[in-house]
Image: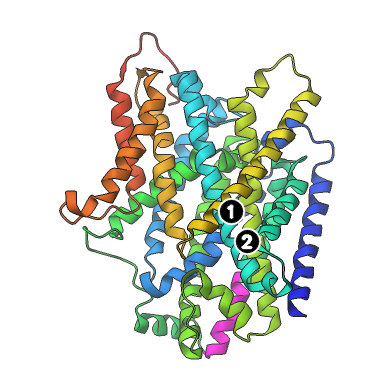
Amino acid sequence: MSSAILLSIVLAYFALLLGIAFYTSRHSNNESFFIGNRNSKWWVVAFGMIGTSLSGMTFISVPGTVGNAGFDYFQVVIGYWLGYFAVAFILLPIYYKMQLTSIYTYLERRLGMTSYKTGALFFILSRTLGATLRLYLVIKVLEKFVLEDMGISFEVTAIVILALILLYTYRGGVKTIVWTDTLQTTFMILALLVCVIYIMHTLGLDFGGTWAAMQKKGYTQMIRTDPMAGNFFLKQVLGGAFITIAMTGLDQEMMQKNISVSNLKDSKKNMITFCFTLLAANFIFLLLGGLLHLYANAKGITAVGDDLFPTIAVKSGLPFFITVCFLIGLVSALFPSADGALTALTSSFCIDILGIKRREDWDEKKKARMRLMVHNAFALIFLACVFFFREVDNGSLIQTLLVVAGYTYGPLLALFVFGIFTKREVNSNSVPVVCVAAPILCYILKQHDKEWLGGYTIGTELLIINAALTFLLLFLFSKKESQPRLTGL
């Protein structure tokens, strides 16, 4: 009976999203889909982006890491916070000055068509892997803890969820997602706070008592001082900062929402407000992780990692309203990352790879048909990736996500840094080779880091190493510009 009720709640939630999609997509066109007609409210975008950045990965995996790693992840979050300032004051002014729809158009104007296509393809690869990894985790939890009792398989769950995402994004695009993300972020944050307050109450603790109990167990340890370890404070902070610059500032999904705001001043306000709010939200997730481990120890629950939160919320005998809050929070965490990624990938492929905005011989209807075909194709690719991740799941996916970002966003970061901070002209033929070779060399280095680097372990700074190696190779295969070109500064 409980599983049937939970499924009904999920379906009702989808119905609400579809209603919002129908309302916001009225009179929409291609510009609505790609950049929301540049009239989004900055505070709506800022709040909605929280859900996109946190995702189901944060909702499930971050609390599960506290038992083994304490508050290590907050070192990375501090780096995220610093990175958002670089996005706000370096990248956003460039995007607004150039009135970009796709941010990768910058690479075309500065470094040429080959660099432009290469950068866009690396975004498509990066975002596809990152989004489907997040999507897989939430589908896995829904299937294991809610739908399995009803005989609904993982495959059916994945297909239905992607079909529903298609339904409410295929027309409105960014114009719709700005508002659905805001709704979903609200539900996710409320669910998080309800779970924290209830578990505190159940354990008979206030905030001070909770912190003391977590300190006693070693859960609150945050600053790691061993420079040889992968979780060294400086590595985590620098890695987090560059992950933000790459995964937010150079990511079409995140910037598509920012540049849908009407002017640069409001877009900067959006980014700064967002970064402070995200700092607080991640701290609360870690606090929840400590509480979940305290509760598990008190009740003899043996679940660990990604299974901890769903096991306690669904299988441990907590009141049904907590299970409902968990489920709504989980679903709310799922969709901002999946729907935004699907829209951004469609936009990037249509604009950057197919050149849809350059096709003067195509009318609006033909462009819309092509956009819909691409949208559906990416949904099928998402489905294939979700099935792939099911086969290679290692039990805790937050670190996997950061490693994937390190390999795939490094070349993209290097291309933008090279374009912004140098006045050199790249050898177009060498760009794709360099951008593929650098991650391969980094992978080899990562496999032998302790052996080759005297015990040093590469952590989140993998992205920096990858970008630096790509930058160096680009520099070696470049020359002084024969004539002045756009730098962006």
Question: Residue at left 67%, top 85%?
Answer: 319
Does residue 465 show up? no
Question: Residue at left 63%, top 24%?
Answer: 354
| Lateral position of residue 242 relative to residue 233, left or right | right
Query: In the image, which disc is placed on residue 344?
Result: none
Mark 2 surroundings: few (<14), some (14-19) or many (≥20) residues within 10 A = many
Mark 1 or 2, closer to the camera: 1
Residue 454 screen position, x and y as percent: 15, 53
What residue is disc 2 on?
A: 139
Name the residue nearer the viewer: 391 or 98: 391
Question: Residue at left 57%, top 39%?
Answer: 255
* Magenta stretch: helix, strand or loop mostly: helix
Name the residue nearer the viewer: 36 or 444: 444
Tell me the quadrant of the picture where the C terminus can be found.
Answer: top left
The amino acid type of the residue labelled 1 equals Phe
478 to 447, vertically: above or below: above
Mark 1 or 2 closer to N-term?
A: 2
Residue 394 screen position, x and y as percent: 45, 62
Q: Which residues are magenta?
A: 192-204
The residue lying furthest to the left in this view is: 454
The amino acid type of the residue labelled 2 equals Ile
What residue is disc 1 on?
A: 387
| Quarter of the view holding residue 445 | top left
Q: Is residue 203 magenta?
A: yes
Does residue 250 show up? yes
72 to 108, vertically: above or below: below
Task: Say what secondary structure mark 2 lies in.
Answer: helix
Task: Say what secondary structure mark 1 lies in.
Answer: helix
